[in-house]
Amino acid sequence: NAGVTQTPKFQVLKTGQSMTLQCAQDMNHNSMYWYRQDPGMGLRLIYYSASEGTTDKGEVPNGYNVSRLNKREFSLRLESAAPSQTSVYFCASSTYNEQFFGPGTRLTVL
Amino acid sequence: GDSVTQMEGPVTLSEEAFLTINCTYTATGYPSLFWYVQYPGEGLQLLLKATKADDKGSNKGFEATYRKETTSFHLEKGSVQVSDSAVYFCALSPFEGGGNKLTFGTGTQLKVEL
């Protein structure tokens, strides 16, 4: 039981490049989330998916897109990366009572 | 909207010292409250939670009491260890369960020294 896994762990992009962050969970959870963590700002919700086939915007969705590929996988895409998107990105999945977090992806945009 | 305010860090303590990390919240209705912990290089883990007023959450020697009258959920531990060094996040959910959209505080870094 791996829990929530994320790939890659680290990534460096140049401004304007695109990339997809991958997230998968093996706990059969319906809900999944993408957060970004910035110094002094805590975690902010980018997008979430309450169930397979549905996605909704969170607090800071601009510049991102998501895909809930199936119940297990929830990907986050940056179409044209900007330095303001330099951050640590966390994926999470949840039961009714608790969210479970992946180890994070540290992204730097130059 | 909902918000969570935590004391700024870093907090530096000697081993066996008493720990308090303050957390206050603003929310409508009756939110559930949580403390998450993030160890270096890892994702967040649920430390404890309380779902109604006057509930006390506890785990691994940490405690927090849901005080509706002061809208607070302060984290305490009687005797910290070096292994408690981490970042602690206070969070709330508008619903009883924590498996919904959470609003996080900014986090408080704790450093425990020998």
Image: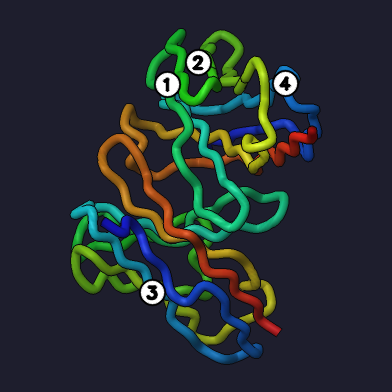
Q: CA distance from mark 2 to mark 1?
A: 6 Å
State the SS at label 3: strand
Q: In the rendered structure, which disc, 4 or 2, sits on the residue that comes first in sequence?
A: 4
Q: Which chain does the numbered disc 1 sit on? A: B
Query: Is A108 located above or below residue A39 in the figure?
Result: below
Q: Does residue A78 appear to the left or right of A48 in the view shown?
A: right
Question: What's under tag 4, amino acid-wise?
Answer: Glu
Color style of the picture: rainbow
The answer as to whether the residues below labels 2 and 3 share one chain is: no
Q: In the rendered structure, which disc, 1 or 4, sits on the residue that comes first in sequence?
A: 4
Q: Position of residue B92 (x, y in %)?
A: 48, 33
Residue A44 visible in the displayed image: yes
| Labels 2 & 3 near each other (Cβ < 8 A) | no
Q: Which mark is residue B16?
A: 4
Q: Position of residue A13 (x, y in %)?
A: 61, 86
Return the residue at label 3. A22
Q: Nearer the viewer, mark 1 or mark 4?
A: 4
Return the residue at label 2. B66
State the SS at label 4: loop
Circle 1 packing at 10 Å, graded few (<14), some (14-19), many (20+), is many
Q: CA distance from mark 1 to mark 4?
A: 26 Å
Q: Nearer the viewer, mark 4 or mark 2?
A: 4
Circle 2 packing at 10 Å, graded few (<14), some (14-19), many (20+), is many
Q: Does residue B59 appear to the left or right of A69 in the view shown?
A: right
Q: CA distance from mark 2 to mark 3?
A: 36 Å
Question: What's under tag 2, amino acid-wise?
Answer: Tyr
